[in-house]
Image (tube, rainbow, N blue to C red):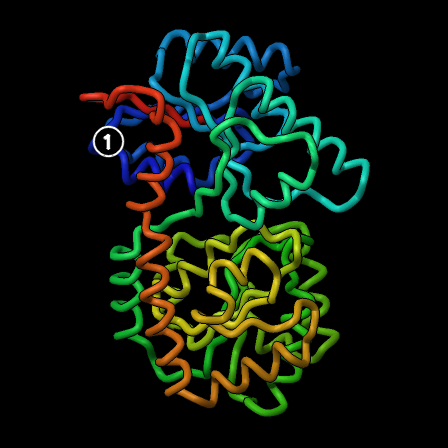
């Protein structure tokens, strides 16, 4: 999604070549193909070893000779792409890191090796938040030169307008709590479902909309049944109309873990004019300005989360005040214009300004 948002913003300025290294996930293919000045290349259908992938990428990069390369997969794939880019003579490269390193020591050592590899390849790491940047620096191997935090950005005007149009058509229905996130262990839908069972005791006329897909879908559905709230929980799957869905929500809940890297869904909810309750983990605390732009509650605490949700559902004035403060912060810090400018500053800091630069993204 970050790659798509940047590509949309840059389509009138740069020629872009999006490279999907694997063909298995193609949910955004239509959106990329609809962009102006943009070519999409999908990776080979047959499984590729590291050397074969390196050669395939190098051929593409050598042929297109982009001025810059952004890599949107942190890990071994980004080392392969960065190495191929260096071999192809590309000078400006960087990789996005979307999550903090894990706490378990074997995985942590692997992340340290990857960070060191990026340093040796002179591939700066653009962390999606200062929280992630700080955790990577704690690995103790040093960071590549020019590494920094570049928060994600969104097209605030477009998202806000779509949500507002949807809100105008909102029918009278139960109050809606929403969460948009993939259904996996990095998030914490479990606590949110427990919280809803408590909310329902005080606000019987409310629903929870869970937007997204993932490996925990069946388990979460079963949990909703066991808590007796299955009729109040709507699993909406992956959707292309998220702004419109946000416009129908009364409160946005973002229940997550310390493994959260940024929480872009938070700034989308804020831009859509929805009051937010989020887990008090580093990434959410950063995005919400230590509670300036939303209510933060202890992670994994269903009781505290339920109390905050009930308070917002029952207090329209509080929701309005939170939304007003949050709108100023998201406009100041998380616009796609500011995000794109930060990427350009990172990639082209040692080069003369391009009159018609060519920009390539790899994902």
Q: Residue at x 33, y 24 (%)?
A: 359
In the rendered structure, the answer to whether residue 194 lies left or right of residue 360 reads right
Q: Relative to the observer, which residue lies in front, 228 or 338?
A: 338
Residue 253 spot, x, y in % from top left: 53, 70
Residue 233 spot, x, y in % from top left: 58, 72
Answer with the quarter of the image where residue 173 lies. Answer: bottom left
Answer with the quarter of the image where residue 119 lies. Answer: top right
- Label 1, secondary structure: give it: loop
* Callout count: 1
Q: Relative to the observer, which residue lies in front, 47 or 257?
A: 257
Circle 1 packing at 10 Å, graded few (<14), some (14-19), many (20+), is some
Q: Residue at x 48, y 42 (%)?
A: 149
**Residue 139 in view:** yes
Q: Residue at x 58, y 32 (%)?
A: 74
The residue identified by callout 1 is 36
In the figure, 69 relative to 109: above or below?
A: above
In the figure, 216 relative to 133: above or below?
A: below
In the rendered structure, the answer to whether residue 320 lies left or right of residue 176 reads left
In the figure, 225 relative to 100: above or below?
A: below
Residue 212 spot, x, y in % from top left: 53, 55
Residue 213 spot, x, y in % from top left: 57, 53
In the figure, 92 relative to 300: above or below?
A: above
Quarter holding the N terminus is top left
Answer with the quarter of the image where residue 142 lies. Answer: top right
In the rendered structure, the answer to whether residue 263 lies left or right of residue 160 reads right
Q: Residue at x 60, y 10 (%)?
A: 52
Q: Relative to the observer, which residue lies in front, 145 or 211?
A: 145
């Amino acid at each position: 999604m970050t790659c798509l948002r940047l590509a949309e913003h840059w389509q009138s300025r740069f020629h872009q070549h999006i490279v999907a290294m694997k063909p298995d996930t193609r949910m955004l293919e239509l959106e990329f193909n609809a962009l102006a000045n943009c070519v999409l290349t999908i990776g080979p259908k047959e499984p590729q070893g590291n050397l074969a992938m390196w050669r395939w990428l190098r051929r593409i990069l050598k042929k297109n000779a982009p001025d810059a390369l952004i890599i949107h997969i942190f890990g071994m794939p980004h080392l392969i792409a960065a190495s191929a880019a260096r071999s192809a003579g590309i000078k400006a490269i960087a990789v996005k890191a979307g999550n903090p390193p894990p706490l378990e020591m074997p995985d942590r050592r692997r992340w340290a090796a990857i960070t060191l590899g990026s340093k040796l390849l002179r591939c700066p790491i653009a962390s999606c938040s200062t929280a992630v940047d700080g955790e990577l620096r704690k690995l103790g191997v040093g960071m590549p030169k020019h590494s920094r935090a570049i928060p994600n950005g969104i097209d605030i005007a477009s998202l806000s307008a779509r949500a507002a149009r949807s809100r105008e058509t909102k029918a009278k229905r139960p109050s809606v709590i929403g969460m948009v996130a993939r259904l996996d262990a990095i998030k914490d839908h479990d606590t949110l479902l427990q919280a809803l069972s408590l909310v329902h005791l005080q606000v019987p006329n409310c629903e929870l909309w869970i937007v997204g897909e993932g490996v925990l879908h069946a388990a979460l559905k079963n949990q909703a049944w066991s808590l007796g709230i299955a009729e109040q929980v709507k699993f909406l799957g992956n959707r292309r109309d998220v702004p419109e869905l946000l416009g129908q929500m009364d409160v946005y809940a973002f229940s997550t873990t310390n493994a959260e890297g940024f929480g872009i869904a938070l700034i989308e909810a804020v831009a859509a004019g929805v009051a937010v309750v989020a887990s008090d983990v580093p990434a959410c605390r950063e995005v919400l300005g230590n509670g300036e732009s939303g209510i933060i509650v202890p992670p994994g605490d269903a009781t505290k989360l339920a109390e905050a949700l009930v308070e917002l559902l029952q207090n329209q004035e509080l929701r309005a005040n939170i939304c007003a403060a949050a709108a100023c912060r998201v406009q100041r810090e998380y616009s796609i214009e500011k995000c794109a400018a930060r990427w350009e500053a990172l990639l082209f800091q040692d080069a003369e300004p391009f009159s018609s630069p060519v920009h390539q993204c790899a994902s």
